[in-house]
Image (cartoon, grey):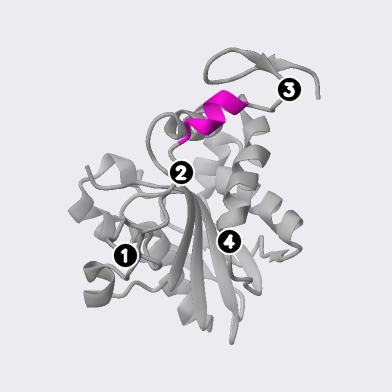
Amino acid sequence: MPAQPCILCGTFSNDGGWCKSCDADLPRLGEAHCPVCALPTLNGDICGRCLKHPPSFAATSAAFAYAFPIDKLVQAVKFSGHLALVGQLADALEPRILTRPDSIIAMPLHPLRLRERGFNQSHLLAQRLAQNLNISLLTEACARTRNTPPQSLLPWQERGKNIRGAFVCSHDLSGKHIAIVDDVMTTGTSIDELASTLRQAGAVKVSAWVLARTLPH
């Protein structure tokens, strides 16, 4: 691999999109976190919120906390088209995946948003993981039917209403364990809504695979 400038610090290296020094500074998610939603807990127990209101997904695998500088890497892919970073990001998530599902589904974009951006970063991540893990990627199983405002622009309490009924699933997933791949989990409402749709299509278990988890301030 020829030397190239690190996207974070500019130092030339042969390490890929970012150098080893910057890689060591990435905010990796700690081991003591809720196995369902990946928020920090004292001893890695299920958090109170997931006990009181269990989401439609059963577990979350996340590589990083969504903080500097991982946020810059995710934004470089999403908004600046630095797609060469996708493989390195997916490879960082892979070691956190401990259970093997039957199939993988990427968080879908609405067709208008996909046309505007030109790619779905979650689909690119899912492609890499499906290839590395030799698991089928269901590319046509789910669609986003409502072009909702970005969740990140809404107050937390409005995000559930915004995403409600936004997905449809055309496949029979009876008896299947499905993993949803997304770039960032903030409140988890989008993944919860998609997981609910998958459960309605027959999935018996849904897991979430995300690059980064937004943590409470």
Along the polypeptide, which appears first: circle 1 or circle 3?
3
Quick check: 113 above or below 170? above
**Image position, residue 112 (x, y; %):** 50, 43
Q: Amino acid at mark 3?
A: Asn
Q: Residues within 10 Å of mark 2 (few under 14, many from 20)?
A: some
Q: Is residue 19 left or right of 107 when viewed as pictured?
A: right
Q: Residue at x 43, y 33 (%)?
A: 71
Question: Is mark 1 in CB contact (under 8 Å) with mark 4?
Answer: no
Q: Quadrant of residue 176?
A: bottom right
Earlier residue among tags 1 and 2: 2
Q: Is residue 11 magenta?
A: no
The amino acid beneath tag 4 is Ile
Q: CA distance from mark 1 to mark 2?
A: 17 Å
Query: Which residue corresponds to the image point at 48% horizontal and 53% vertical from the top-left?
Result: 62
Label 2 near label 4: C-beta < 8 Å?
Answer: no
Q: Mark 1 highlights which residue?
A: 43
Region rendered in magenta: 20-26
- Asked if residue 149 shows in the view, the reply is no
Residue 125 visible somewhere in the drawing: yes
Q: Position of residue 147 (x, y in %)?
A: 41, 49
Q: Which residue is mark 2?
A: 28
If you read the primary sequence from the N terminus, does the residue marked by circle 3 or circle 2 appear first? Answer: 3
Residue 14: give its label: 3
Amino acid found under the numbered disc labelled 2: Arg
